[in-house]
Image (tube, rainbow, N blue to C red):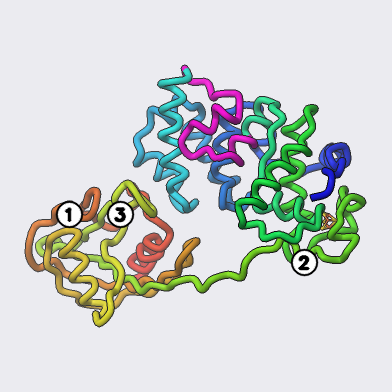
Amino acid sequence: MTAPPPIAPLLLDWWDAGHTDLPWRQVRDPYAIWVSEIMLQQTQVMTVVPYYARWMARFPTVQALAAASLDEVLKVWEGLGYYRRARHLHAAAQTVVAVYDGRLPQTAAELMKLKGIGRYTAGAIASIAFHEPVPLLDGNVIRILSRLQDLPHDVTQTATQKKLWQLAADLVPSHRPGDYNQALMELGQQVCLPARPMCLICPVASHCLARQRGTQLERPVRPPRANTPHYDVAAGVIWHRDDPARFLIAQRPLAGLLGGLWEFPGGKQEAGETLPQTLQREIKEELGIDIEVTQFLTTIKHAYTHFRITLHAFHARHTQGTPQNLGVADHAWVTIPELGTYAFAVTDQKIIAALRAT
Ligand code: SF4
C-alpha cells in the first residue's frame, strides 16, 4: 500500500461547507450517539430517522432503557430488522448502569467490552462523542479507501482488512476526529457511491489513484457472490377450538435469528413433505398440539442476509392437546385487536395485514 494520502483537511472543509442535518448530529449526548450508531448498522439513514425519534422519546436515557422490559424494547424496535441489535443495546444499557454508574465508557477499547459494540461502532462513538482519534471501517469506508489506494486485493480477506484498518487509523486526525469520521461516512453515502462514484464533485479526488487510473468500478475487489440458499416455510394462523375469535401466536427462542419476537408458528419444509404436513409436524414439535390445516391465506417472499425464504401462511384449526413451550419461548391465544401489543418480524406483520384484509 502507498503512503496514506493527506485527505483530512479536504474532508473537514467539505464537511464544514455543509452536511446532512440528522437528529443525532445535533446532540452531544453519548447515549443518543450510541443509539443512532446501533440503528444505522445495516439500516438506511432515512429509515432510521423516525425510529430514532420514537426510541429517544420512549427511552431518553440509558437508565430508562435499562429499566425497560425486553418486550417493550422489541416493540419500539419492531420493523427495523436485525433484532439482535435491540437485545444487545438493552443488555449493554443494563451493564452501563450496573458497572459504569450510568456513564458510557469514553474510549473505543472500553466501549468494545459492551454487548453489540464492535470495532466500527466503538470508533464512531469514541470519536464523535469523546473526540478520541480512532478509526472506523465499514462497507462505505472500505470502498473509499480501496479506491483512494487503488487496492487490488480481496477486501474480504483478513490480511486486507488488517491493512485497511491500519490505513484508516493512519488517516484519522487528532483534531476533530469525530467530524472527520462522519465526513468519511457521508462521502461514502453521497459521493463515492458503489456503481456511480461522483468523482467530479469529490473533495478528495486529487488523491484518488482509482480515479487517476479509471479503476473506480473495479474497487473494492470482492469474491464472486455464492448462490444464496432458499427455503420454503409454512406458518399457521391456528384458530382456537372453542373460541372462534382467538388464534395462537408463539414467541421465538431468545437466542438466534429474530429472537424474542412473536410469530405465527411453523417452520421449514423438509424433503417429501407437503406444506400442510410441514405445518402439522412443526406445530407438534414446537407446541405439542395437533392441528387441521383448513385454508391457504397468503405467500410472502423475504430475503435475509444469508438466505431467502418463501413463507406460505395457512389457516388451521386446533384439534387436540394443550400448547406447551417445547421449541418456543412462550405462546398466547390472542384476538386480532390484541396483536398490537406484541412485536412481530416483518414477514409476520405481512401475515397480520393479510389476516386483517380477509
Ligand atoms: Fe470515490 Fe471518485 Fe472520490 Fe475516488 S475520486 S474517492 S472513486 S468519488
Of circles 1 and 3, which is in front? 1
Graded by Cα atoms within 10 Å as few (under 14), some (14 to 19) or many (20 or more), the crowding at tag 2 reads some
Graded by Cα atoms within 10 Å as few (under 14), some (14 to 19) or many (20 or more), the crowding at tag 1 reads few
Label 1 element class: loop
Q: Looking at the image, tell me whether mark 1 or mark 2 is earlier in sequence order.
A: 2
229 horizontally vs 226: left or right = left
- Closer to the camera, 17 or 356? 17
Mark on residue 215? none
Label 3 element class: helix
Which residue was labeled with disc 1? 326
Q: Residue 55: where, in percent of width, then height?
A: 50, 38
- The residues bearing labels 1 and 3 have C-alpha atoms spaced at a distance of 27 Å
Which residue was labeled with disc 3? 337
- The residues bearing labels 3 and 2 have C-alpha atoms spaced at a distance of 51 Å
Span shown in magenta: 101-124
Label 2 element class: helix
Mark 2 belongs to which amino acid? Leu
In this rendering, the answer to whether 198 lies above or below 57 is below
Q: Looking at the image, tell me whether mark 1 or mark 3 is earlier in sequence order.
A: 1
- The residues bearing labels 1 and 2 have C-alpha atoms spaced at a distance of 51 Å
- Closer to the camera, 147 or 245? 147
Q: Residue 89: where, in percent of width, then height?
A: 46, 37
* Pointer 1 with pointer 3, Cβ within 8 A: no
Residue at (32% x, 46% y) in the render: 254
Quarter of the image that includes the C terminus:
bottom left
Q: Looking at the image, tell me whether mark 3 or mark 2 is earlier in sequence order.
A: 2
Total marks placed: 3
Mark 1 belongs to which amino acid? Leu
45 horizontally vs 294: left or right = right
Mark on residue 217? 2
